Image: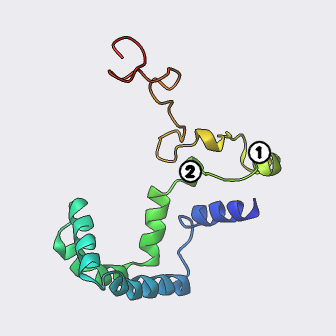
Amino acid sequence: MQALRLTLDEIAGMGKAPVPAVELDEAKTYLNGAFPLEIESAGEVAARVLTTLGYGLGREFLDSYRDRIGAVTAVAIQRFAATRIHPERSVVVLVGNAAAFGPELAKQLGPFETIPAADLDPLAPDLRRRPAAGRDKPPAPRPGSGRGPGG
C-alpha cells in the first residue's frame, strides 16, 4: 500500500514542481543511450520505422529523436504533467488478495472495486470480460456428426 501511495504522490508532484536536474539528466542519458541498442538489427530498425509510420510520424521523427530528448526541460515536463496527467482520474489495478489489502486501500484512497481474476479483461474499457455469445448453450450439432436431426 505504501508503494502505491508513494507512486501516486510522485505522479501528482510532477505537475507542481520541476523534476530535479539530476533525475532529468539521468533519464536523458538512459533514453539516448538505449535508443541505438533498440535498433541494432535490420528487423529492429524496420519495426521501429513501421511503428513510427503507423502513428503518422515521418522518418524525421526517428532522425531527430536523440536531439528532441536532449531538448526536454524540467519546465516542459512540469507543464506537461500539470495539464495532461490527472492522477485523481487514474485507474489503478492491484493484483493479489484483496481481503488482505482492501481495508487499508479503502482507508487511504476510498471505495474500490474488486474484479475476480476469472472476470478480468485488461483490454476492456471497464476491465471486465464479456460473456462469450452462446456460452450457456451447448454447441449446435454438426451435420453428419451423428447427433441430432440429419446426423
Q: Position of residue 121 (x, y in %)?
A: 52, 43
Residue 17, by quadrant, is: bottom right
Is residue 109 placed above or below 31 in the rendered structure? above
Q: Residue 90, which numbered label? A: 2
Dot 1 amino acid type: Ala
Q: Choose between 119 and 73: the one closer to the eye.
A: 119
Q: Residue at x 57, y 42 (%)?
A: 120
Q: Choose between 109 and 14: the one closer to the eye.
A: 109
Direction top: furthest residue: 149
Q: CA distance from mark 2 to mark 1?
A: 15 Å
Q: Position of residue 97 (x, y in %)?
A: 76, 50
Is residue 46 placed above or below 56 in the rendered structure? below
Quarter of the image with the N terminus in it: bottom right
Q: Position of residue 18 (x, y in %)?
A: 53, 74
Residue 76, by quadrant, is: bottom left
Q: Residue 106, which numbered label? A: 1
Q: Residue 138, which numbered label? A: none
Q: Choose between 118 and 23: the one closer to the eye.
A: 118
- In the visual, does 121 lie left or right of 115? left
Mark 2: few/some/many CA within 10 Å (<14, 14-19, 20+): few
